[in-house]
Image (cartoon, rainbow, N blue to C red):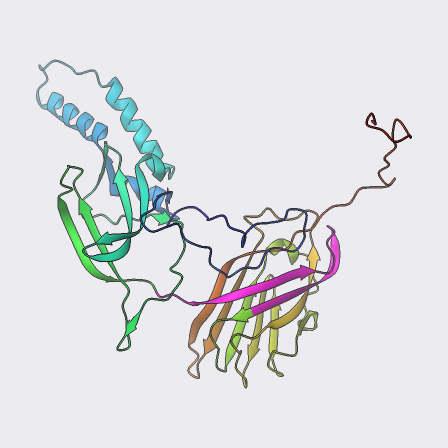
Amino acid sequence: FGPRLASALTEVDLLSAIPPKAGDSPTRPPDGTEVRCTAQAPPGFAALCNDVLEFDPCIQRREIQTFEAQNPTAPKTDLTELDASCVELTTYCETGQMSELFSCTASIAVLIEGTRKSQLEFTLAPNVQIREGSLFQVLVTGYNTRQKPVTTSGATVDYWIFTTRRADSAKTILDEQRSVVGFRLLGVVFVNLISPNIQTVSTADNEVTIQIQLETEVDPAASLQIEYPMAFSEEAALEGATITTGDTFPRKVTIRHNDNIIEIETQDEALPRDTLLEFTVVLSNPSISPPPEENIWRFTTVYLDATGGAQNLDCNYDVPGFRIFGSFRDPTPLMEPGIASPGPNVE
């Protein structure tokens, strides 16, 4: 867990239209490293946040108001400070600013109960509580393991342990749930190349070459699904003939291209693993290159069984797309020296 890791594998050349290869996982920080991570509210959680979290200033204010209502002759308490704190924390909650309500720390490959494990820890701010019986949800970015979990006798050993603890020095355990089954990991679609034939903006009929390799062979019926940024589909000619598969693809394929979704399906032959699969697609360049957070391609391979069921096998949902550039208007930029003779003093 934690922020995106910088490495030579993901380094982007801003002057090149062709993005770096995608699929190889970067080297992790050394064992025992503690990483600060960022907690985010999942979609829709902000509207329910006050039903999940409660805040000490709000509780104290409510108790004082209840006491004064039951004891009219008692001295009145100045609630200005409690009001301000309650409003501030409630606003953080309602606007999804989770990092203001608790911190997030990930410890990489630490020794827990005699076994090397990674640990994700959320620490509530001093005035924040989780309501008993409520459903607590949070999003944390990070990397999946570089190896799939070990399989023993057909069962995958991929268990999580969830624990709540007091903030005292002994970190007294309050609740604990062991043997929670983790999420299923898929194989990787390695994207070696996304190369546009035309690199200028506002251009139609741009033939883009894509090269991929699969980690898992997909038996027929097999489907390769590609989703690219919507900005490149606005004026593209979206007929099946605009997509051409290379020699290493199965000979007979069905191609569907709707909006920004491409499906290449084969009924008779498998999609092979560890084989360079190349295809081209004709797209339309928009008037400006999409920002990096929107210029993302997504790849998925799917096994389609005889009953109509579908099983995802390999994927890559974070592939940087190609970039396009504007051009200088006429006249062509001109450079002229202030002094024509050689020497250091040239303007």
Q: Residue at x 50, y 61 (%)?
A: 24
Left or right: residue 302 compared with residue 325: left
Q: Which is the main secondary structure of the residues drawn in magenta?
A: strand
Percent position (x, y) of residue 20?
59, 56
In the image, residue 298 lies in the stretch drawn in magenta: no
Left or right: residue 187 compared with residue 204: left
Percent position (x, y) of residue 23?
51, 61
Inspect this view and state whether residue 235 appears: no
Give the quadrant of residue 76.
Answer: top left
Percent position (x, y) of residue 25?
46, 58
Q: Residue at x 21, y 15 (%)?
A: 78
Q: Residue at x 64, y 71 (%)?
A: 279
Which residue is at the front of the view, 75 or 178?
A: 178
Which residue is at the front of the view, 165 or 339?
A: 339
Left or right: residue 163 compared with residue 271: left
Inspect this view and state whether residue 3 appears: yes
Q: Residue at x 30, y 41 (%)?
A: 49
Q: Is residue 183 above or below residue 2?
A: below
Specify the segment rendered in magenta.
184-212
Q: Is residue 68 above or below residue 257?
A: above
